[in-house]
Image: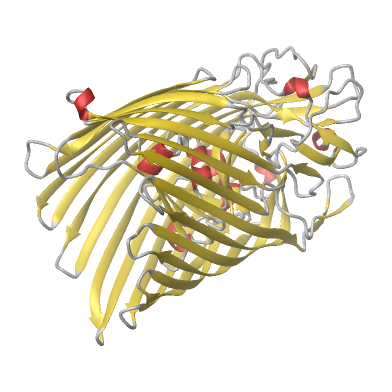
């Protein structure tokens, strides 16, 4: 592909101690991730974040990640694929910053291999899992089965995510040219979420300020709406592990995937593959979400509740036809893809937003209080037809192009808590969208192990931000984005060294940005430019060195509007939230070739300054963290019947750095803190 693509496989996840999909960001170039309140595993890349980065499951989109994202363990994943930059040709809606595709483990042909693992950390969290796969006694029938459970406990008091996952797949080779398969997966999470730590004025009486987490000027956004007095901002040192959620809070989800398909090699040049799928999900949130410091009364933190229930059902099909041919002596590969899906998304949402105030320190967390729900029903039908072609003009130079035609129909209905239709607000309503997106580029192998590439690609997203919360009162705009990208991919002849370089220029028009809660405003354009460099080398036996850097300049253009208080706001030239201008990662390890092989290593991650809101007044300060690990591989001779045993020890955030991991512009008065130093011991087995 004439684009930047990263594949993080299961072995890399194990080596780098990646436990959840949020952690995947640490293994990618120029990517940050955060567990946004109630919507975990949200990514930022190339100047865009949240719903501007598409999330796929085995190539299937289920909806905006801020609505459908759940905490997820990586134990059942074969790999995570990341495509950078606008890519609606492949990923569909929302892929402006890029797309992240989670690929579950699949059967292999050959001897049965069993795997098991367990771990325990200093927050008293644990993981355990088992997997098995290979060929059965039935000729042509291969299987894969995985089961895992974890309790991901947080450093924040009374906060955790309990994750359970079971998945399986059968592949049956009817003959050498035809394979059929079926897969099922059930995921469940039970959570008590951390919704953020309040920002406070550093000069307020009694505040114990911290250094290095946040800086800049702040006023209470949620209550004062940009009009309050600006004060220097900090995080109170007494609140670093405090939960402000209600005592009876609970969140969770159950998700069921059923997939089946076939792959048919019709002849040596033509192949057809298809999968049908069904997805059923039930999600719920029952929390205090807003934690906003207010020094106007005796209690310092204003709190506000929100409860939600989701019921989503999705059906669809993806079919690909691939034709390899020769045109005038030039190799050509043509792919046609047909996709169709139908999604019903039902929401029951509390309308009372019950509120209270509590002390900043040692708050009396109380209970949720009254609730009165409205019902919102969204139906989304999507069909697309795309064509891609690669023509090799020479043995080293190829032109690659593609186009995607999409037809989207959205229907929404909304009912008051008493069951009456909200007809006065424009419901029910229907609207179509017909984006056309594509890519054109080239790849050029100028020398063995040296490939140049460039591309122009586009993306589109109806509703600009989130198709599941589009209202008839909001302009029904079609956002469009485009990228120019060029780069080089290098690999040494002995494959012991590799490097990549890419430069990009992305522009997105008609941008929605979160203003507070679920209120959005329309910006004119966003522009993002940057470069990414990555390299890895094994200079001598046993030594691994790797590193990467990303420089990004992202800002709004023509973003001015009248706010709700009648004041004029202009964010033109400002940087979007959660976009650092510099990210660097580096690591090194050494393996001692002894009777019991031991490997030791360390890694560093630096993330530059970021902002938690588009006015850029509050800075989430740059931070650098260090991790260290050691593991020993115990050969079969020590454990009869076990081919590989690994015992590992890992320290995360070695220097115990205090830092802000993420800021949600919908929750402008609170930020998500990064985890302090922790220790983990783990064991894995393969036989």
Counting the numbered discs, the total is 0
Q: Is residue 191 above or below residue 666?
A: above
State the residue in front, 538 or 391: 538
Q: Residue at left 48%, top 29%?
A: 650
Report the residue that reaches farthest toward the front: 594
Quarter of the figure with residue 600: top left
226 to the left or right of 444: right
Q: Position of residue 69 (x, y in %)?
A: 51, 38
The color scheme shown is: secondary structure
Question: Who is closer to the viewer here, 302 or 338?
Answer: 302
Q: Is residue 75 visible from the viewing direction of this image?
A: yes
Q: Is residue 88 left or right of residue 340?
A: right
Quarter of the image with the C terminus is top left
* Position above or below: 404 against 257: below
Q: Residue at x 35, y 35 (%)?
A: 76
Q: Residue 136 at x, y = what percent?
A: 11, 36
Return the x and y of residue 151 as percentages of the image width and height: 47, 22
629 in relation to 121, above or below:
below
- In depth, the one of 190 and 44 nearer the eye is 44
Which residue occupies 41% across, 23% down?
A: 119
Left or right, 315 with reference to 477: left
Quadrant of the image containing the N terminus: bottom left
Q: Position of residue 360 (x, y in %)?
A: 79, 19
Q: Looking at the picture, tell me which residue is in the foreground, 225 or 637.
A: 637
Question: Does the rendering let one see residue 377?
Answer: no
């Amino acid at each position: 592909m004439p684009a930047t693509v990263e594949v993080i496989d299961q072995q890399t996840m194990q080596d780098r101690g990646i436990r959840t999909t949020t952690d995947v960001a640490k293994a990618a170039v120029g990517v940050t991730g955060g567990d946004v309140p109630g919507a975990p595993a949200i990514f930022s890349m190339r100047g865009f974040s949240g719903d501007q980065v598409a999330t796929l499951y085995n190539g299937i989109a289920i909806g905006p990640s801020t609505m459908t994202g759940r905490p997820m363990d990586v134990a059942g994943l074969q790999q995570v694929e990341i495509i950078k930059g606008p890519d609606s040709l492949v990923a569909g809606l929302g892929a402006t910053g890029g797309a992240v595709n989670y690929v579950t483990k699949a059967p292999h042909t050959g001897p049965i291999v069993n795997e098991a693992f367990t771990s325990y950390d200093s927050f008293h969290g644990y993981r355990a899992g088992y997997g098995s796969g290979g060929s059965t006694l039935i000729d042509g029938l291969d299987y894969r089965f995985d089961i895992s459970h974890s309790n991901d406990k947080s450093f924040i008091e009374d906060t955790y995510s309990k994750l359970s996952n079971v998945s399986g797949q059968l592949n049956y080779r009817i003959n050498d040219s035809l394979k059929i398969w079926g897969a099922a997966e059930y995921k469940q999470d039970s959570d008590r979420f951390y919704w953020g730590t309040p920002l406070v004025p550093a000069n307020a009486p009694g505040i114990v300020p911290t250094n290095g987490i946040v800086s800049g000027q702040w006023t209470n956004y949620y209550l004062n709406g940009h009009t309050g007095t600006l004060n220097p901002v900090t995080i109170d040192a007494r609140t670093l592990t405090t939960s402000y959620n209600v005592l009876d809070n609970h969140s969770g989800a159950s998700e069921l995937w059923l997939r089946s398909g076939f792959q048919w090699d019709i002849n040596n040049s033509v192949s057809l593959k298809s999968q049908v799928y069904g997805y059923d999900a039930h999600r719920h949130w029952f929390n205090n979400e807003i934690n906003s410091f207010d020094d106007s009364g005796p209690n310092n933190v204003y709190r506000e509740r929100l409860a939600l229930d989701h019921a989503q059902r999705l059906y669809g099909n993806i079919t690909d036809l691939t034709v390899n041919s020769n045109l005038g002596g030039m190799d050509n590969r043509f792919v046609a893809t047909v996709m169709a899906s139908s999604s019903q998304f039902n929401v029951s949402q509390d309308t009372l937003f019950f509120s209270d105030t509590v002390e900043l320190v040692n708050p009396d967390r109380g209970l949720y209080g009254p609730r009165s729900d409205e019902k919102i029903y969204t139906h989304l039908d999507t069909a697309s037809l795309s064509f891609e072609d690669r023509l090799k003009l020479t043995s080293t130079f190829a032109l690659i192009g593609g186009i995607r035609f999409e037809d989207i129909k959205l229907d929404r209905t909304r009912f008051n808590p008493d069951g009456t239709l909200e007809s006065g607000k424009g419901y029910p309503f229907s609207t179509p969208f017909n984006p056309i997106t594509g890519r054109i580029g080239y790849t050029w192998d100028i020398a063995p192990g040296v490939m140049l590439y460039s591309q122009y690609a586009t993306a589109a997203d109806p509703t600009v931000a989130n198709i599941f919360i589009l209202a008839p009162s909001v302009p029904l705009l079609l956002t469009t984005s485009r990228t120019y990208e060029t780069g080089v991919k290098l690999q040494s002849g002995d494959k012991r060294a590799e490097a990549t370089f890419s430069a990009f220029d992305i522009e997105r028009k008609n941008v929605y940005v979160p203003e507070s809660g679920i209120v959005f405003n329309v910006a004119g354009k966003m522009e993002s430019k940057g470069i990414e460099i990555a390299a890895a080398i094994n200079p001598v036996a046993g030594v691994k060195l790797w590193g990467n850097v990303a420089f990004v300049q992202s800002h709004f253009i023509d973003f001015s509007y009248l706010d709700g208080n009648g004041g004029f706001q202009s964010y033109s030239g400002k940087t979007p939230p959660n976009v650092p201008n510099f990210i660097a990662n580096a690591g090194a390890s050494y393996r001692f070739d002894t009777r019991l092989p031991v490997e030791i290593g360390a890694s560093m991650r630096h993330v530059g300054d970021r902002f938690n809101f588009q006015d850029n007044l509050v800075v989430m300060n740059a931070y650098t963290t260090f991790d260290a690990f050691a593991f020993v591989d115990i050969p079969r001779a020590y454990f009869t019947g076990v081919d590989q045993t690994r015992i590992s020890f890992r320290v995360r955030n070695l220097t115990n750095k205090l830092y802000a991991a993420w800021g949600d512009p919908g929750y402008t008065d609170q930020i998500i803190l990064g985890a302090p130093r922790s220790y983990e011991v783990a064991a894995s087995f393969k036989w």
